[in-house]
Amino acid sequence: MFATCCAWNWPCSVSRLIQFAGIILLVVGCTERKPVTLGPPFEGNALPISALAQADTTARVVVSGTMTEKCPVAGCWFVMRDRSGTIRVDTKNAGFVVVDVPLKTTVVVYGRVATNGSERFVDASSVRY
């Protein structure tokens, strides 16, 4: 079939374009996505969100979960959830926003537990997704 195609044969050109697009999608879809870190790099084992209720407000923590909600205007805060609970994460002081991070993305947060009245939240220093 391809041996008889010529450059001026419209159906053949469309067929080749579709094949080329399929190859590109296969290559892009099979590549491993590297994690993106906003803020300085960090390491550590993630605590469950429920453990943050007892954490000292000066302690640095790592917590992991799914982003369920975020600031619709500036991306300066988001809410994350794991199996043990939910917590609000504030990124204003970190110097980055999460506007481009899609909802339902698994995120790992490094920061300090802080309080705003009776509410506990994480004042983030870094976010990896």
Image (spheres, rainbow, N blue to C red):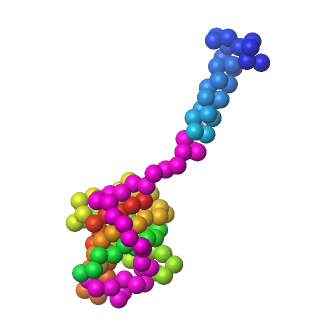
In the image, residue 47 lies in the stretch drawn in magenta: yes
Q: How far across and how far down the image is residue 32, in percent?
A: 52, 49
Q: Which residue is pictured at 43% across the width and 84% down the height?
A: 50
Q: How many labels does the image show?
A: 0
Which quarter shows the C terminus?
bottom left
Q: How far across and how far down the image is residue 118, in percent?
A: 29, 88
Please identify the dominant SS of the magenta region: loop
Q: Which residue is pictured at 63% across the width and 35% down the height?
A: 22
Q: Which residue is pictured at 54% across the width and 41% down the height?
A: 28
Q: In the image, 80: left or right of 18?
A: left
Q: How far across and how far down the image is residue 12, in percent?
A: 69, 19
Q: Is residue 71 visible?
A: no
Quarter of the figure with residue 120: bottom left
Q: Is residue 15 visible?
A: yes
Q: Give the range drawn in magenta.
A: 28-57
In the image, residue 51 lies in the stretch drawn in magenta: yes
